Image: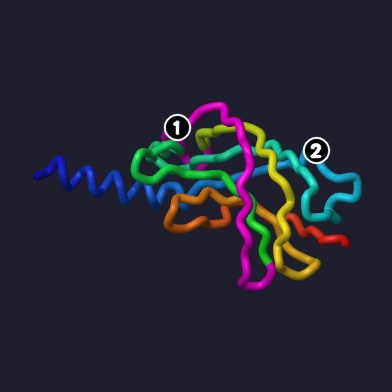
Amino acid sequence: MVSREMDKVEHIEHFQSANRLEIQYTVIDKPEAWPRTHPGDTVRIEYTILNPNPYKVDLNHPEMPLTLKTVFTEHLNAVFCEGTYTASASVLNEGTPDNPSRITGTFTFTVPESGLGRNVKMGLVLDNGYCAPLLSAVTEIRYLG
């Protein structure tokens, strides 16, 4: 009985710990006019995912895998965009606020036809299939054309 209860706690903590991660990023390959962009432009980002929590976070968890995506937002509307990414590992070890564990990598995506306005904000999320919290700072971009 105790083992089953611990499984529930670990499952819930995995879900919550993922929501407490932080993503830092730098745009490294971008359109010439960036942060002005057109749908179809290709953008490449270097990112670091930080875990300041005392729990491991498995990005490939069998029940709740995490997928790195970009999000484009305007007011309360959002468009999520998948891409391709590399990662230095698939598990973020336990960390602390003063010494978070890290995973680094690159993420490449194509700017989507958003259906939003011309001025939007872009950030990075880890989508777990239930929610996709914004875990990074945002970049203000302007759609052209």
The image shows residue 28 at horizontal and vertical percentages of 78, 37
Asked which secondary structure carries label 2, the reply is strand
Label 1: state its secondary structure: strand
Residue 75: x, y in percent? 66, 72
Q: Nearer the viewer, residue 38 or 13?
A: 38
Q: CA distance from mark 2 to mark 1?
A: 26 Å
Where on the picture, by quarter, is residue 107? top right
| Quadrant of the rendered image containing residue 109 | top right
Would you say residue 96 sits in the magenta stretch?
yes
Q: Is residue 8 left or right of residue 117?
A: left
Q: Quadrant of the C terminus?
A: bottom right
Which color scheme is applied?
rainbow
Residue 36 lies, with reference to residue 84, above or below; the image says below
* Quadrant occupied by the N terminus: top left
Magenta stretch contains residue 62: no
Taking the spot 60% from the left edge, 31% from the top edge, the residue there is: 86
Please tell me which residue lies in front, 24 or 41: 41
Q: Quadrant of residue 10?
A: top left
Looking at the magenta stretch, what is its main secondary structure?
A: loop
Task: Tell me where the magenta segment starts and ends, as one range.
Answer: 74-98
Q: Is residue 63 left or right of residue 67?
A: left
Q: Are marks 2 and 1 in contact (CB under 8 Å)?
A: no
Residue type for callout 2: Asp
**Res. 29 mark:** 2
Which residue bears the numbered disc 1? 91
In the rendered view, would you say 110 is above or below 93? below
